[in-house]
Image: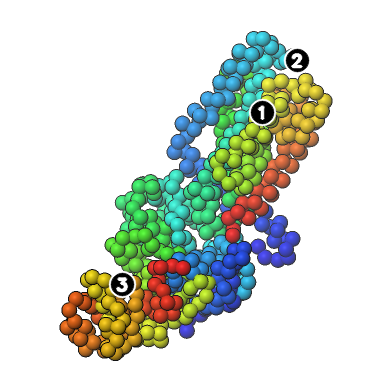
Amino acid sequence: MRGPTWMVFWKGLIPSYRFVHVWRRHFMVWRKTAMASLAGSLGEPLLYLLGLGYGLGRFVGAIGEMDYMVYVASGILASNSMNTATFEAIYGGFTRMTRQNTFHAMLATPLTVADVVAGEVAWAATRSLISGGAIFLVGMVLGAFSPGSVLMVLPVVVLSGLAFGAMAMVITAISPGYDFFLYYFTLVTTPMFLFCGVFYPVASLPPLVQSLVGVLPLTHVVALLRPVANALPVLDVGFHLAVIVAYALVAFTVAVALVRRRIIV
Amino acid sequence: MHPTIIVASNLTKRYGETVVVDGIDFAVGQGECFGFLGPNGAGKSTTMRMIMGLTPRDGGRLEVFGRDVIPEDSVLAAQMGIVPQDNNLDTDLEVGENLDVYCRYFGLSAREREEKIEQLLAFAQLSDRRYTPVTKLSGGMMRRLVIARALVAQPKMVILDEPTTGLDPQARHLIWQRLAKLRETGVTLLLTTHYMEEAARLCDRLLILNRGCILDQGSPEELISRHVEPEVLEIWNRDGMPSLEDFADLPGRKEQVGDTLTIHGFQLETVRQLVVQRAGYACLLRPANLEDVFLRLTGHDLREGL
């Protein structure tokens, strides 16, 4: 990274292909406990799906034309992509950055901070993909997803994982300790889980709240996944995709700068 | 003189108001084993981290392999092997896997990796531990693995920050043996230590650092002959401290270190015999070492720190 300051700055944000090695390392570790990890990441969404889909579904019946089980299943698929990527980048990422000094060991090689952060984010998205795939399979058996939609659903899940993984890396980079993450969950991810259309239509909220919720990334993930998973036409595909991509890019840039500030001292 | 591969001039690092490295100058030649000797807090590790490209400098010039050092330079990183002070091994992985991921970070192909892992496990005498989780290794084994890990890309230079701190004498000797072997292959070694024995044993040249400043640099023999007399007679008393006055009549330069009195001079055997005759004192005649140099230059013991 040599040259004029602005160029150094931009180049410092762009990962090289080497980020794959970081991703590969995380995969290697995950493989050791894959079964337990899969069971864990499938358990909670499955409980929501059954508890709310069957339990609440009996009272709600349907939302619009959509059976409540079907409605909530796509919501869970979306929120799970957020939660899985967030947890991985926050707890996994923070442990590797601080307690295990994995980032430091990586930086003693040709890897750069951008490579390391890209590897983390890519891995977080991979975790979203793995558990998203499992949920899709279960939901499909329950009749909540149309089987043919899988090729459109999973890319959206990955994109969502990239965006939420990058956002979580920003928090990881500034966190003084594990307790700090509770603020992020309480102030950011839990509100999104409850207000972004996972369980009921955003349109049922007061107008002011609706416009607030419209700014949040999960709203757009839900807006894409719900029709896509049920082979229905999607409105404003480009807009929703653009919002999620923008979150991913901006968060990644900030995360790289903050991780660099924290460990290259 | 070998070609110079590290040049530092007026190298400076500050953390806030504290000047950790205070404008130091040095040069390291290819194939040399160059040591940084100093107590904790002298600025050794910070200097190493600047050379490794893990810490940006605040002033001065620093070139490695003819390249200005800046953090995250993949080209420089590819030519250096780094042994950090803390064993940042990947605790989620086994011994062999630790080498494997490192090989990948350096971009080695699958075939190169397999060959390298076998070779390095043998070098580190860990061949039978390939599938052991690193958390199950002893301190000495971990250290050997970290050194092996630094060698995956056949570096021209290996930087070791306190390679043997906290190890028992046996483990330390094993590390020294490995490093000597490495030096025979022509690899440049850069190391920090606060063990003068380690510095004397391994280093062709060394630099004595205290509070961010260089006190002197040269070969161990040069430093000793420049600053202290060749022989030291240590005198101690079974009950209480031997006082300077008790030995005022004897020749030589006298120093009080802890509860030991030392006499520095030339051919002290006759003095030793005089001391032996005095009841209640025990003494030891030994050649001067770097510890004495450090004491002479700073007025305090190496292990005392700041």
Give the answer, above or below, for where A13 lies relative to B223.
above
- Label 2 resides on the chain identified as A
Tag shown at residue B259: 3
Name which residue type carries label 2.
Gly
For residue A122, say whether it is visible: no
The residue indicated by pointer 2 is A64
- Label 1 resides on the chain identified as A
Q: Looking at the image, which residue sits at the far front? A: B245
The residue indicated by pointer 1 is A193
Give the answer, above or below, for where B88 lies relative to B70.
above
Q: Is B87 placed left or right of A209 in the picture?
A: left
Mark 1, residues whose alpha carbon is within 10 Å: few (<14), some, or many (≥20)?
many
Foreground residue among A192 and B156:
A192
Task: Assign a secondary structure to mark 3.
Answer: loop
Expressed as whole percent of the image width and height from the top left, the position of residue A177 reads 56, 44
Expressed as whole percent of the image width and height from the top left, the position of residue B106 reads 52, 57
Task: Assign a secondary structure to mark 2.
Answer: loop
